[in-house]
Image (cartoon, helix red, strand yellow):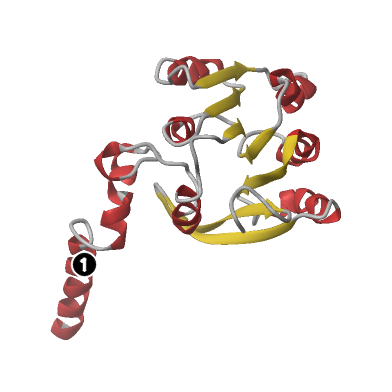
Amino acid sequence: MLKNILGEFRVIKKWFDLRFKGYLYDEGWFDSIKRRKSIGRGAAPKIWMTYPFLDFFEERLGSEMSIFEYGCGNSTLYLESRVGRVFSVEHDKIWYESIKKKVTAKTELLFRSIEPQIDYVQCIKDVVELFDIVIVDGRYRNNCVEFSISFLKDEGVLILDDAERAEYQYARDYLKSKGFRKIEFRGIAPGIIYKKSTCVFYRNNNCLGI
């Protein structure tokens, strides 16, 4: 009995020590749990996607890039500090107003209701430009994927979060039918401990150098 108790104590101590060193500490995971936000160390905004994806993604972003995202938040703040222009659509008015107070002139937030669905899904056409990257991490993801690829540059890529979900099988199959290949990044993300998937869909000569 004593041996088992000591063993459990050692496990608890090691877990406690992780708060001050190691991978989760370096990524700011404990801060994200505590504050219930997608942040890194020092409360820096993070995209709420897998850490393996973020490691891959960050070093490939550039100030000349333009990005459109379905669903705004800390991801919007993260992106605007790394690329030239960010356009983001949001359906929640209160959340939209909250993020709008934090963004700079590099970002344009678009408020669109999800009823009717078409207003939200097709709002990307209102920007009147093509994008290096489209991020689908909001509502109606299958429909957003299908509609938005027409607004990618030839070298553009599409990023689908939570791509492991069965409900997004249509989006995965649709992109494959249109000639996109994919890289899947599985792992944990800020604020969560379960494994999820972030997928990058790309073609030849893409802007991320894949």
Say whether residue 194 is visible: no
Q: Nearer the viewer, residue 128 or 48?
A: 128
Q: Quadrant of residue 153?
A: top right
Identify the residue at horizontal 36%, vertical 40% (top origin): 39
User: Residue 183's image quarter?
Assistant: bottom right
Q: Secondary structure at mark 1?
A: helix
The residue positioned 74% from the left and 40% from the top of the image is 145
Which part of the image, by quadrant, shows the N terminus? bottom left
With 101 as the anchor, is 18 left or right in this view? left
The residue lying at 82 percent from left, 50 percent from top is 174
Point out residue 139 in the picture as x, y percentages from the top left corner. 66, 33
At label 1, the amino acid type is Ile
**55 is higher (above) or lower (below) than 119:** below
Q: Answer above or below: position of 156 versus 194.
A: above
**Residue 50, percent across and down?**
49, 53
Residue 119 at what x, y percent from top left?
A: 75, 19
Other-residue count near label 1 (Cα within 10 Å), few / some / many at <14 / 14–19 / ≥20: few
Residue to which mark 1 is pinned: 12
Using the rendered image of the protein, determine whether residue 90 is visible from the camera's viewpoint: yes
Could you tell me which residue is drawn at 46 percent across and 41 percent down?
47
Is 90 situated above or below 46? above
How many marks do you count on the picture?
1
- Residue 5: x percent and y percent? 17, 77
